[in-house]
Image (spheres, helix red, strand yellow):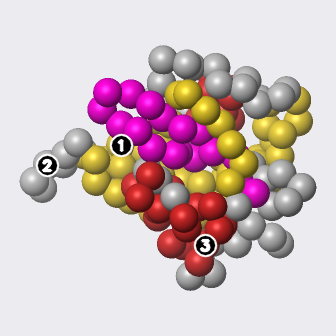
Amino acid sequence: SPFMKTINLAGCIMLDDQQRILMLHRNTPKRTQWEIPGGKIEAGESAEAAAQREVREELGLEVIISREIGSRSFVEDDHTMGYTWFLADVSAGVPQVMEPDLYDELRYLSMADLRELRPELSANTVNFVTELEAGRVKLTA
């Protein structure tokens, strides 16, 4: 409908030394999928601050945002979701599943892994992989 509300989200792409991406596996009655760590931007919060907060809440990590790398929208539950991706470096902590009621696993996934897992990726992650493969999102300077 034309009155569909856009919900803005932000998340972090964090790479290991093999350029694999840190992903969370959601396992809830509603959804089972691999996701980029992130979530909703709260009122009065910047996209960067939201991405950092979500990573802290979901993975127990402190991160430094290096730059915004892109954004795409998707539709979920009758809402348009606008998602902004940030490249981030872990400054403190070891990644762990902090919300076991939502997530059951975390893993560093390569591009080959992500291609193979495509049916199990969230809509946002599929968008990210598509943009990366098209060269519109770059993980290196």
Q: Quadrant of the C terminus?
A: bottom right
Residue drawn 28% across and 47% down? 76
Residue drawn 61% across and 32% down? 105
**Which residue is tagged 1?**
7
Where is residue 55? Give x, y as percent: 66, 33
Give the extent of the magenta segment. Answer: 20-36
Residue 33 covered by magenta stretch:
yes
Mark 1: few/some/many CA within 10 Å (<14, 14-19, 20+): some
Where is residue 30? Give x, y as percent: 30, 32
In the rendered image, the residue lying farthest to the front is: 116
Residue 95's image quarter? top right
Q: Is residue 29 depicted above or below 36 in this figure?
A: above
- Find the distance from the CA under tag 1 to the CA under tag 2: 12 Å
In the rendered image, the residue lying farthest to the bottom is: 134
Tell me if 62 is positioned left or right of 129 in this view: right
Residue 58 covered by magenta stretch:
no
Residue drawn 48% across and 34% down? 26
- Circle 1 — which element? strand
